[in-house]
Amino acid sequence: MSSDTTDTSTESGTENGTEGSASTDVLETTGDVLLDVTPVAMKMVLEIRNQEDDPENTALRVEVAGVTGVEYKYDLSFDDISSADDTYAKYTIGELTCIVPENSIDLMRGSTLDLPSNPMQEGLVIRNPNRPNPLGEMGDIELTGEPADKVQQLLELQINPALASHGGFAELIKVEDGAAHVLMGGGCQGCSMSAITLAEGIKSAIVDMIPEITEVIDATNHEAGENPFYTD
C-alpha cells in the first residue's frame, strides 16, 4: 500500500530551520527523530493518513528523491509500517510513525515538516539544514604542481564543467597566503545563487582537495550582473 500525501516543497527558515507555524504543543517521540513534524503539519498528515485502509499500521515514508539546484527534492508517501526493513530508520512522533530509507537518513537529519509560512501556498514544506553540493560529486582527480596550478586544474577539469550548465565559469585570480581568490563570470555573475554556489560548492571542493589552500575568497563583482543579489 502506498499513496502520496500532499504537495511538498522546500522553504528556507530561520535558525535551526523552524521558521513558520509556531506552537507550544510538544508531541511525545520514540526513536531517533530525523524529520520532525510541527503540530499543525501533524494535524494535516494525520487527517490524510486516517483515510487509509489501515491507518494504525500505516507510516509516513520520507525519502530524498533528487536535487534541484541547491535544494533536495522529496518523496512523501504512506506505506505499511511492516514494509520498512532493518535498513530503514523508524521512529514515532505522537500518533505518527515515520520511516526513512537508508540512503536518506543522513540527508534528512535535523529537518522539519511544516506548513508554508506563506498562507497563499498550499501543501507542506520541508525545512532542511542539509544541502546538496551544487556542483555534484567531484570524484577522484590527480592534481599536480604548485597550489595555484592545482586550483587551476580543479577549476578546468571539475568545477567549470559543472558551472557551464548555468552558463557560467569560475576563474582563479591569485593564490596568496593560502587563500585562493576566485572570480565567477558568465551566467553566474550577478546570479542570486552565485554566492551560494561559491560558498557551498567551489570552496568545499578546493579546500577539501587541495590541503595547501585554507580559504577561498569570492572576488566577484556581483553587482555587475543583470540580477545582483549579493555584494561583499
Image (cartoon, grey):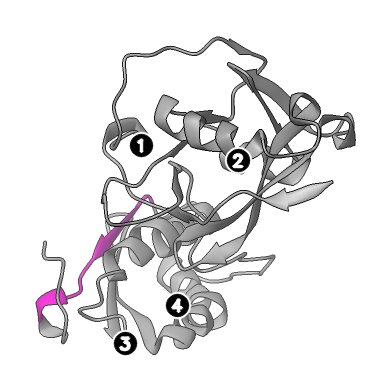
Residue drawn at (58%, 31%), measured in percent from left and top? 46
- Of badges 4 and 1, nearer the viewer stands 1
Which picture quadrant has residue 48? Answer: top right
Q: Amino acid at mark 2?
A: Ile
Q: Is residue 120 visible?
A: yes
Q: Amino acid at mark 1?
A: Gly
Q: Where does residue 193 sit, x and y in percent of width and height?
A: 31, 69
Residue of label 4: 152
How crowded pointer 2 is (Cα within 10 Å; few <14, some 14-19, many 20+) is rated as some
Q: Is residue 221 visible?
A: no
Residue of label 3: 187
Range of the magenta residues?
A: 214-223
Q: Is residue 80 above or below residue 148?
A: above
| The one of 158 and 13 positioned closer to us in this rendering | 13
191 magenta-colored: no
Q: CA distance from mark 2 to mark 1?
A: 25 Å
Q: Secondary structure at mark 4?
A: helix
Q: Secondary structure at mark 2?
A: helix
Disc on the earlier residue, 3 or 2? 2
Q: CA distance from mark 4 to mark 1?
A: 36 Å
Residue of label 2: 48
Q: Where does residue 169 sit, x and y in percent of width and height?
A: 38, 84
- Of badges 3 and 2, nearer the viewer stands 2
| The one of 188 and 112 positioned closer to us in this rendering | 112
Q: Secondary structure at mark 3?
A: loop
